[in-house]
């Protein structure tokens, strides 16, 4: 049945070549029209695993607590402190400019000049909370006396280290952002918002006397997008190097253009389809189309290798193209379907951005089946090849494959046994070394950017100048309404704050309990002995009620109490340690009617993402390998094929994890798809080699003979493809986008190690399996002609 379908399809396609080419050209024009409309599109909400415990907490209390989607702008005086007329007026201008930006929650804007920033003093009437720059401070009346008054109020209000740097050379403005504008529901364009931050804030207010520093999710995404655009020359360089390498391999401009052109066509289709489906291209997914392009080049080179081999054997261009189509349709489709299913398994990770990555990659791989396995051989049939080319092709082929004769000896039993033993040892070592591999970010600031990038330099400067870290995790205590005088609730918050403060990386704790203790001490002439929570419920309620004007610490009726843990960074290890300690505290400290909930804050959101990625990784790998095993079995109907194709892939995968661990590349929403792609490319090599091996087994050859012939026929193309792709992506290592540089190193390694495993371990495993468990029946080919 399969033979008949392939023959019918071959006859129709090559019998209607002009129609086929015309249909592909028309589809490319239509897709190109929509592809040019594709835009970069980032979003905060789509990074959140909405069903996770922490995100549910974040969403439920985001209007009452500090939001995780926050932008922070710091005005830093290059000469002297901020306490002068020019510095304070400029800080006011920055505050007003930020308030006017689209997407900003204006009620959340906080600086020395906003009415939600208070200082509290004790008067004869008790506590009195007043804005730091209240109605008695006018921007036009900033005399030395008024400035000294503002400075005193900021100090007494505890704003040094939060809104004013410790060295008092900087003032901060913070604001929460709406991912969707309330009322209209319009999404915030983070790329455009970043341009506004640069144009309306940094460029406008930065000069020789003042520096403007900006951090936050919006700024981070914008910086990644800018660096992503600046990386275009590296993609062009990779393309040129690939083209030169293919030309060196086939010595024909026409045969060089074919695989590159077909891969570009599928890229145009992919981008056009994304726009038609209503998607944009996320800055963190900008590498995916180019990675899928690499898959296309890999398959294209296999096609060119087959065609050149047929031409060298004296076949015509039409005959070589038809032989390539029938000979590679099954292994090529199998490899691409495996890659497709591998990407589809990413949909099991409940993070919308990963779903977009999966859809983006899956669409690209699906189109490869048409452009690389159908369009390429049909187009190749039109190429007029001189008779001299066949002679030269045979000469180059024999010269390149001569040294493969020595490598093919690894398929001999006496050597195969050692190869298998070494493979087992390497896998055990890689598995051991990859234990405890990193999940999440391992860098301060934005791990996608270089340490010397403007964003990360701003982040480092702000972190070193302010007490509260850039990253915070909020634990929410949910209690019955009107619990402001509940000594047990506040004591629980205080005990938690003290217990978690001991964790590495926690630089400060803020809660209703810590602020309540400060008020209590203030009522008693700042006596440090009175820095404790009042035991009398009325006194406690009085102290806590004075916190009602402070943001992010409690609900009005104390039904929600926030404990904010400010962290020195958002490294996965830092966040995980804090989360584990909170969980342990929650287990050991149960108070009736009080629920301790994790977690809000940007570190809480990151903790949720890290946990989802870690939890999904193993099941996803099992699905990928299960799919590969099933497809291989359904195709070859041989359990040996399952092991022979998957064993080399498994060793290479764990070597990749070891590589990631040693280079401090964490497994994140951005790197996980790259590992999946590496599996997809790695299995390509195995399928193409095993397909030829099975063909020769069906002719009655021994496994050793079949393996040797398979390596001699596909080895050059496999090695060439791996080296070419590795060189191309290795150029990314010089990119200013650190994520791209890391992925270039990782992919170069994975391309090479998958090739090495396929060329050595695959034939050795095949030989030893047949030696240990001899076959009982002849091998049947899949109806593929023996070309």
Image (tube, rainbow, N blue to C red):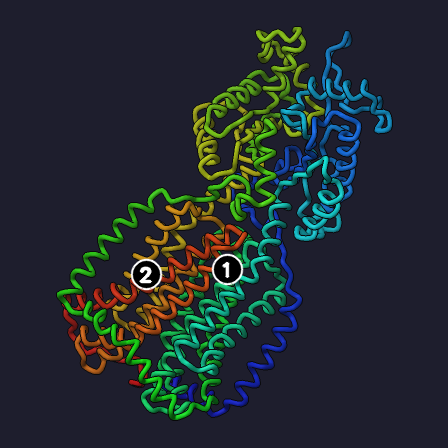
Rendered image quadrant of residue 588: top left
Which of the marked residues, 2 or 1, is nearer the chain's N terminus?
A: 1
Residue 56 image point, x, y percent = 56, 40
Secondary structure beneath disc 1? helix
Q: Nearer the viewer, mark 2 or mark 1?
A: 2
User: Looking at the image, is 741 positioned above or below residue 371?
Assistant: above
Secondary structure beneath disc 2? helix
User: Looking at the image, is 164 positioned above or below residue 614?
Assistant: above
Pointer 2 residue: 649
| 663 and 323: which is toward the camera | 663
Instruction: Name the residue rendered at 30%, 65% in the picture.
Output: 758
Residue 274 image point, x, y percent = 59, 65
Q: In this rendering, does residue 558 appear at all?
A: no
Pointer 1 residue: 358
CA–CA distance in space, label 2 to label 1: 21 Å
Residue 478 image point, x, y percent = 58, 29
Tell me: 561 left or right of 252: right
Instruction: Name the residue rendered at 45%, 73% in the picture.
Output: 244
């Amino acid at each position: 049945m399969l033979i008949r379908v392939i023959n019918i399809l071959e006859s129709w396609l090559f019998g209607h070549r002009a129609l086929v080419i015309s249909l592909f050209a028309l589809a490319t024009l239509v897709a190109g029209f929509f592809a040019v409309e594709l835009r970069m599109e980032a979003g905060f909400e789509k990074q959140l695993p909405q069903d996770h415990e922490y995100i549910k907490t974040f969403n439920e209390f985001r209007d009452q607590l500090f939001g995780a989607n926050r932008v922070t702008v710091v005005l830093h005086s290059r000469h002297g402190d901020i306490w002068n007329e020019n510095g304070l007026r400029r800080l006011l201008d920055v505050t007003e400019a930020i308030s006017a930006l689209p997407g900003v929650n204006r009620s959340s804007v906080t600086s020395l000049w906003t009415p939600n920033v208070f200082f509290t003093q004790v008067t004869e009437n008790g506590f009195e909370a007043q804005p730091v720059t209240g109605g008695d401070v006018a921007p036009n009346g900033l005399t030395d006396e008024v400035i000294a008054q503002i400075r005193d109020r900021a100090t007494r209000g505890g704003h040094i280290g939060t809104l004013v740097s410790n060295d008092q050379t900087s003032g901060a403005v913070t604001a929460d952002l709406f991912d969707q504008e309330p009322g209209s529901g319009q999404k915030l364009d983070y790329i455009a918002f970043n341009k506004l931050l640069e144009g309306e804030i940094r460029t406008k207010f930065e000069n020789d006397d003042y520096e403007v520093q900006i951090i936050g999710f919006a700024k981070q995404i914008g910086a990644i997008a800018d660096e992503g655009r600046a990386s275009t020359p590296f993609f062009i360089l990779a393309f040129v190097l690939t083209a030169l390498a293919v030309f060196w391999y086939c010595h024909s401009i026409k045969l060089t253009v074919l695989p590159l052109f077909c891969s570009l066509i599928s890229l145009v289709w992919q981008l056009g389809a994304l726009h038609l489906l209503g998607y944009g291209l996320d800055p963190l997914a900008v590498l995916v189309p180019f990675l899928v392009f690499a898959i296309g080049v890999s398959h294209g080179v296999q096609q060119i290798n087959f065609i050149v081999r047929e031409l060298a054997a004296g076949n015509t261009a039409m005959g070589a193209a038809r032989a390539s189509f029938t000979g590679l349709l099954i292994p090529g489709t199998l490899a691409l379907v495996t890659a497709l299913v591998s990407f589809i398994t990413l949909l099991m990770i409940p993070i919308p951005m990963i779903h977009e990555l999966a859809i983006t990659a899956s669409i690209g791989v699906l189109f490869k089946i048409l452009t690389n396995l159908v369009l390429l051989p049909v187009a190749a049939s039109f190429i007029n090849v001189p008779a001299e080319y066949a002679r030269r092709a045979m000469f180059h082929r024999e010269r390149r494959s001569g040294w493969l004769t020595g490598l093919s000896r690894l398929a001999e039993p006496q050597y195969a046994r050692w190869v298998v033993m070494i493979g087992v040892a390497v896998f055990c070592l890689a598995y051991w070394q990859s234990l405890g591999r990193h999940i999440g970010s391992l860098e301060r600031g934005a791990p996608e950017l270089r340490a010397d990038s403007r964003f990360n330099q701003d982040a480092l400067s702000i972190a070193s100048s302010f007490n509260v870290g850039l990253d915070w995790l909020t634990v929410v205590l949910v209690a019955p309404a009107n619990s402001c005088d509940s000594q047990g609730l506040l004591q629980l918050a205080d005990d938690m704050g003290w217990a978690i403060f001991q964790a590495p990386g926690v630089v400060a704790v803020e809660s209703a309990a810590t602020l309540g203790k400060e008020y209590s001490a203030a009522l008693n002439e700042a006596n440090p002995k009175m820095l404790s929570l009042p035991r009398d419920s009325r006194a406690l309620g009085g102290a806590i009620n004075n916190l009602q004007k402070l943001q992010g610490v409690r609900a009005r009726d104390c039904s929600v109490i926030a404990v904010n843990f400010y962290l020195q960074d958002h490294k996965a290890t830092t966040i995980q340690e804090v989360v584990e300690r909170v969980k342990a505290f929650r287990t050991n400290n149960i108070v009736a009617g009080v629920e301790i909930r994790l977690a809000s804050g940007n570190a809480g959101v990151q903790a949720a993402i890290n946990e989802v990625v870690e939890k999904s990784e193993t099941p996803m790998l099992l699905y990928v390998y299960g799919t590969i095993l099933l497809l291989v079995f359904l195709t070859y109907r041989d359990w040996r094929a399952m092991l022979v194709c998957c064993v080399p892939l498994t060793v290479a995968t764990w070597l990749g994890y070891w590589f990631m661990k040693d280079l401090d590349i964490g497994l994140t929403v951005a790197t996980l798809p790259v590992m999946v792609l590496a599996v997809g490319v790695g299995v390509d090599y195995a399928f193409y080699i095993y397909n030829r091996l099975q063909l020769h087994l069906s002719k009655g050859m021994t496994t050793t003979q079949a393996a040797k012939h398979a390596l001699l026929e596909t080895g050059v193309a496999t090695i060439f493809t791996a080296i070419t792709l590795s060189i191309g992506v290795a150029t990314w290592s010089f990119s200013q986008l650190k994520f791209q540089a890391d992925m270039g190193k990782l992919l170069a390694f994975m391309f090479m190690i998958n090739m090495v495993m396929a060329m050595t371990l695959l034939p050795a495993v095949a030989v030893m399996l047949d030696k240990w468990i001899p076959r009982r029946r002849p091998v049947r080919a899949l109806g593929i002609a023996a070309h």
